[in-house]
Image (cartoon, grey):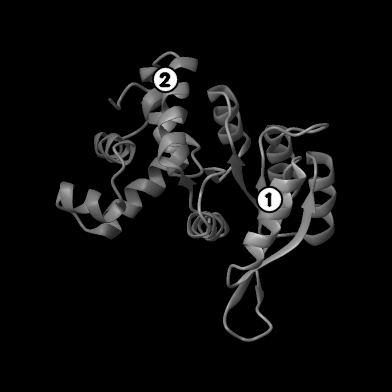
């Protein structure tokens, strides 16, 4: 991220990729109206998006799942592998559940439907740039269901976690924030953050979206 020219704060540099010209141009206009957001490139497919990322090194790429030549899942995977400082937010009209799960595994940081308003998109972009995940409510439900269907429950996945870490994981899967978890367990928020860090390290998780899917695969979430 770069300082904005008017000194108002930090400018978030964004590349977007969508094969539908009307949608792409609309997003360019919409994002251009958001304070502190600069669209540095727009692509009609995944390969063009990869070229723009290599050229501009944006903070976040807003990518559609359905694109020619290189779809959103492959684009996400390559961006995260080749440009680890660039985060990815998936924006889609519709997608089969396996594609959503594949994008999550590829390293997407956020998931939004294309009917998301400007405020939701801005929030998702900012969260992604800060290393936090954002998942639209309906898409989160579908991600969880896909994770549950695609992988049998494997209790062995939680071996190595302490009882308290498993409890924290269950509460994360229930949608609780660190503050809410601290209140539920009657511990400090700093203690919860320590448990979350240990949990993520042991389980190889990047963010809370992956933690939710992991909890369902391990069979410890309802």
Q: Secondary structure at mark 2?
A: helix
Residue 28: x percent and y percent? 70, 58
Residue 43: x percent and y percent? 79, 48
Q: Nearer the viewer, mark 2 or mark 1?
A: 2
Q: Secondary structure at mark 1?
A: loop
| Mark before the other along the chain sequence, 2 or 1 | 1
Quadrant for the N terminus, please: bottom right
Viewer-closest of 16 and 194 = 16
Residue sitting at x 80%, y 46%:
50
Quadrant for the C terminus, please: top left
Viewer-closest of 109 and 38 = 38
Residue 93: x percent and y percent? 59, 36
Q: Residue furthest top?
A: 152
Pointer 1 residue = 84
Taking the image as drawn, is residue 159 in sight? no
**Label 2 CA crowd tier, 10 Å (few <14, some 14–19, many 20+):** some
Residue sitting at x 42%, y 35%:
138
Pointer 2 residue = 148
Relative horizontal placement of residue 173, taking residue 38 as reference (left or right)? left
Up-down relation of residue 98 to residue 191 (above or below): above
User: Residue 128's quadrant in the figure?
Assistant: bottom right
Q: Residue furthest left?
A: 186
Viewer-closest of 178 and 157 = 178
**Label 1 CA crowd tier, 10 Å (few <14, some 14–19, many 20+):** few
Residue sitting at x 62%, y 68%:
33
Residue 211's tag is none
Q: Residue furthest bottom?
A: 7
Up-down relation of residue 9 to residue 16 (above or below): below
How far is the residue under mark 2 from the one under mark 1? 28 Å
Residue 64: x percent and y percent? 67, 40
């Amino acid at each position: 991220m770069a300082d904005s020219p008017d000194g108002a704060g930090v400018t978030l540099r964004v590349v977007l990729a969508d094969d539908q010209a009307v949608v792409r141009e609309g997003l360019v206009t919409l994002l251009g109206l958001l304070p502190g957001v600069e669209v540095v490139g727009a692509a009609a497919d995944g390969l063009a998006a990869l070229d723009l990322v290599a050229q501009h090194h944006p903070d976040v790429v807003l990518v559609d799942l359905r694109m020619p030549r290189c779809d959103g899942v492959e684009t996400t995977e390559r961006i995260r592998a080749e440009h680890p400082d660039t985060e990815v937010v998936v924006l889609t009209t519709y997608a089969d559940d396996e594609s959503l799960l594949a994008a999550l595994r590829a390293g997407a940081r956020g998931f939004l439907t294309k009917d998301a308003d400007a405020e939701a998109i801005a929030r998702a972009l900012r969260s992604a740039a800060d290393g936090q995940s954002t998942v639209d409510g309906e898409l989160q439900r579908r991600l969880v269901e896909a994770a549950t269907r695609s992988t049998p429950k494997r209790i062995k996945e939680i071996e190595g976690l302490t009882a308290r870490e498993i409890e924290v994981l269950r509460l994360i899967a229930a949608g609780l924030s660190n503050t809410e978890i601290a209140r539920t367990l009657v511990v400090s928020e700093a203690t919860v953050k320590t448990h979350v860090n240990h949990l993520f390290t042991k389980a190889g998780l990047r963010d809370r979206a992956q933690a939710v899917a992991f909890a369902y695969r391990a069979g410890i979430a309802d």
